[in-house]
Image (tube, grey):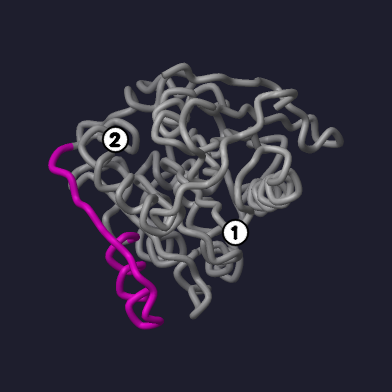
Amino acid sequence: MTIKQKLDVDYDPQNNLKLDYYWDDSITNKGAIIDIHGGGWFRGDKLKDADWATRLAGEGYFVIVPNYRIVPQGHYPDPLVDMENVYEWLQFHANRFGFDKNKIGVVGSSVGGNMAVELAIKYGIPAVSLSGILDIDDWLATHKEVVAQPDTKQNFNGASATINQDGSNDAFYKWFIMNYFDNSESEELWFKATPYHRVNEKTGPIFMANSLNEFVPTTGVTTMVETLNQFQIPSESHFVAGTKHAKGYLDEVFVQSMLFLDRFVANDELQPKAIDNGI
């Protein structure tokens, strides 16, 4: 198995946004996966997810990992607009890359998990969310006494798998969410940005995981599952013991997440190989 890659492909020249893509042309292509990196909407880069993208490509998927606008270059909803542009870019290039444009899924960790769920809601595609930021308006409303503070202990430019905590960290959680909103106190804006308020009958199936004692609250997963159930949308949830965040526990949920993607993206039907010439 040899994973190939092409880096720094323009998808939005106006905002200087690029993406990388990964594939293995020795494996029949199952479909395409958008892999959205984390970083609190204030740090991070697509290369942080080269590890996850390589694993997904090794499972037979054509994988793209995009950059998106982060604070201070972009605030809510700019990153979501960028992900919509990525989805449209991938749809447009489906024939070139040799996959069925109806077989697209999305994965993401931390804030990438938030945006993965947003794409599932907007386009009805399957999503995998690891430690997704899903509980926003209710959490902010019930934690007004928390003083927002940055976390200076973590290396957010490093591998996502190393970003762990010693437990809950409400001050940091509030800090990066408020940064995303440019410190707006608008409860209407918080409501609008909370994914489970917009779940509908066309939402795609969602796989969600969370550590039981990390800085991202588990309430986002439990409330999302309850909401998806109301609309009869298939979902899976996994709670992992410990404090690891997002890709820090990827090995523990990788098999389950691949079974989910194979079921809802590939539908167990093998697709034509990605085209190697000029890909």
| Quadrant showing the N terminus | top left
Q: Which residue is the site of mark 2?
A: 250
Query: What is the span of residues highlighted in magenta in the rendered image?
Result: 220-242
Rendered image quadrant of residue 55: top left
Q: How far is disc 1 from disc 2 in space, using C-alphas? A: 26 Å
Estimate the x, y position of residue 112 in percent, counting from the top left. 49, 43
Above or below residue 15? Residue 113 is below
Q: Which residue is the site of mark 1?
A: 102
Give whichever of discs 1 and 2 has the lower sequence position.
1
Residue at 41% in and 21% down? 159
Q: Residues within 10 Å of mark 1 (few under 14, many from 20)?
A: few
Tell me the amino acid under the disc marked 1. Answer: Asn
Q: Of helix, strand and loop, which one carries label 2?
A: helix
Estimate the x, y position of residue 222 in percent, counting from the top left. 27, 65
Residue at 30% in and 42% down? 215
Residue at 52% in and 43% down? 33
Q: Count the labels in the image.
A: 2
Estimate the x, y position of residue 16 in percent, counting from the top left. 79, 30
**Which residue lies most toward the right here?**
14
